[in-house]
Each structure stands twice: as structure tokens, then as C-alpha cells.
Image (tube, grey):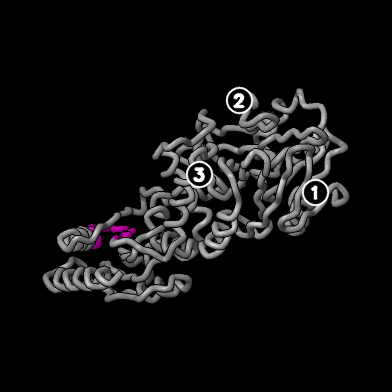
Amino acid sequence: MKPRLIRPGVYWLGAIDWNRRLFDALIPLPDGTSYNAYLVQGAAKTALLDAVDPAMEDVLMHQLAGIERIDYVVSQHAEQDHSGAIPTVLAKYPQATVVCTPKAKDLLVDHLGIAPERIQTVEDGETLDLGGKTLRFLYTPWVHWPETMVTHLVEDRILFSCDFFGSHVATSNLYAGDDPYINEAAKRYYAEIMMPFRKMVQRNLEKVRGVEFDLIAPSHGPIYDHPVDILAAYEDWVSDRVSNSVVLPYISMHGSTKKMVDYLVAALAERGVSVQLFELTTTDIGKLAMALVDAATIVIGTPTVHGGPHPNVFSATHLANALRPKLKYAAIIGSYGWGTRAVERIAELIPNLKVELLDTVLCKGLPNAETFAALEALGDTIQAKHATL
Ligand code: FEO
């Protein structure tokens, strides 16, 4: 992709990674991603905001072929998908200075071996005049790492938001418009990347609300030309509101836990409670993370393997704990062969979830009338709890 003009003297650069399917060896990327960089040319100085993932630095360097001088490389975030190509950019532009937060300086030195004498740190709110274009830096810790900042291009009313408001989606469209597909990708991104830091995201959202901008230009995914939509979506996601819905990740080895799950799904549906079901040998964990953004309750369905939950349930529960969703209730259901400590093991896995643990429903072997009655009672409990949301 060639550089694309956003405003006079302001260009999108970067790489669209159509084929990447896994991020950080963990996060599924069903729609690929992009590593956006931006070039801002003032009357006196030129700045590059962010670089790209090192795997695609040749794309960025090709785009910079005709750019004779870069004075500042603004590193908004030290993670490699934004900063990995900075050493190559610095080698091409020996006069360029890296601009970042003090915390980012340490990380850029440690992770990328950038010489400290080439780095200039900025304070929160500090500005840099490029000549008719003013960059104002705002610390936004924990979106995504503790060192992260965003950059406001004052005259052009653009907020360069780095990971904040990003979406892992590869598209040839420069702008998001009102495409619901982008909103879905942004929710997935929030769930996977931002949700563990929800309270910090809330604070940073308030902070950028005080900035005047017409465009939000993140470092992943398209530019928001109607920022009101993504801002409203974030307001909802970071709020304390939960919905009348249950997330139900489960595994069944011999069919008994599946019978229980199916029964409970029907019972909840009859009671007007929405359920999202995730069979953990096949599910996309990104979809599970998205469902956790505003669900009120998680019900974990597991058979017992070597005394504890199935390893896939163990992994999904560990993930849910790490993502710190705003769940209010949790329950465990499942079948076991002759004995179980699955409930104790699962309870140990979720210290971050501030949930009330509802009744457990376990059965030995096949579920029977007593099991189904217990599931009906669990459905009643969930319905009653959700009625108070
Ligand atoms: Fe896009 Fe935190 O990296």
C-alpha cells in the first residue's frame, strides 16, 4: 500500500497484514490486522508516529523511500508491533530522535536495543512544534502497556491513539465509516487487549474526552471518521453495566455434561435469559472474550479429568480470570466418573472474578431427574439474580 493522504502534510503509512492469524502466539486474528504508522510534516520538522511490526518493516521502509528527512520518531508504545521497525528507521535517518514517555525509554532500550542517547522523553501534556503542526502527548497508561501514550495533532484535530480504539482487521479502507464489521472487530480487540485494564481504560477515556478531535487514528485497523460511535461503544464496554446473559463455556467427554448443558440452555431460554455457548475444543477464544465483555453470569461446564476440570476448561477459566470481565455470578456444572475436585480447582482459578458463586450442579455418570431438577433450580436462581441487574 502506498502512503495515503489524511490531511495536508499528514499521511497514513504502515502495513496491512492480511494473512496473520495469531497475535502474541495467543490471540486469534480471524480478520488479519494492520500496523499503522503516520507521517506528519510541519513547515520545519517531520515526525513519524509509530513504526510497524518488524516482520513487515520492508513495507514501511519502501513507503519512506522518498522521504529525505525525519526529525522525530514518536514511539507511542514500545510493544514490537509498533516499535519493532524503529531501529531500521533510525539507521536510515541518523539525525532522528525518538520521542516517548520515560517508561517507554527503558522498554525501548531493553526490548529493541535503541541507544538511550537517541531518545528524548516527554512529560504528560508536553507539546512538540513541527512548524504549524503541534503534537501534544498524553500519557494513557495501560492501553496497552504502562508506558503508552497517545498523540493529539492539534491543528488538524486528529487523535493518534495507538492501541487505544484499535481493531485487528485487515482492510484496504482507510476509514471505518459506520461499518458494523469494524465495530465488531473493535469489540473483539477491546475484549482481548483492553478488558483486563478496564478501570484504567475508563480513566483514559475520560482523559481523551477532553481533547478536541474529528478523527481517531489508531495503530491497528481503520481510522474512525465518526469517532462518536467508537467512543460510545467504549463507554458501554467499560461501564459497570452487565446484560441479562450467560456465557457457558464447556467440554463434554462422553455426552453427560453436554446433556446438562443443553438442559440448562433450554431452561434459561424459557426464563428469558440469553445464553452464549462455547464448546471448548472448537471455539474461537476471541468470541468467548467478546461474550465476556458484558455478560452477567458465567456457567462453566466440565467433566472431571484426573480429579480436576478438563484441561481446556482449565485454560479457558484461566483466560477468563486474566481478562477480568465484569461478571457478577458464576456457577459450575458437570458430570464425573467416580469422584471429583473440579469445583475446588475451578474456584482456585478465578480470584480476579468478583463473582457470587451460585449453586453447583454435579452428577455421577448420566444426569437423572434429580440433576435436571437442580438445573431448573439453577435457572430460577440466575433468572432471579438477573432481574435485579
Ligand atoms: Fe498493538 Fe500493545 O500492541
Q: Farthest left residue?
A: 369
Locate residue 270, reporting x and y percent.
15, 60
Residue positioned 14% across, 72% down in the render: 373
The crowding category of the residue bearing disc 3, from other C-alpha atoms within 10 Å (few below 14, some 14 to 19, many at least 20), is many
Is residue 366 positioned above or below 97 on the image? Answer: below
Task: Give the secondary structure at mark 2.
Answer: loop
Real-space CA distance between mark 2 and mark 3, rounded to the nearest whole angstrom: 24 Å
Residue positioned 50% across, 31% down in the render: 171
The residue wearing badge 3 is 227
For badge 1, the amino acid type reads Gly
Residue positioned 70% across, 51% down in the render: 137
Verify whether residue 246 appears in magenta.
yes
The crowding category of the residue bearing disc 1, from other C-alpha atoms within 10 Å (few below 14, some 14 to 19, many at least 20), is few
Select label 2 or label 3 by which is in front: 3
Locate residue 76, reporting x and y percent.
68, 49
Tag of residue 377? none
Verify whether residue 203 appears in magenta.
no
Q: Between disc 1 and disc 2, whose residue precedes?
A: 2
Tag of residue 1? 2
Q: Is mark 2 within 8 Å of ligand 1?
A: no
Displayed quadrant of residue 81: top right
Asked if disc 1 and disc 2 are in contact, CB closer than 8 Å, the reply is: no
Left or right, 143 with respect to 125, comes to left
The residue wearing badge 1 is 113
Q: Nearer the viewer, residue 111 or 108?
A: 108
Select label 1 or label 2 by which is in front: 2
For badge 2, the amino acid type reads Met
For badge 3, the amino acid type reads Pro
Which of the image's four quarters has the C terminus? bottom left
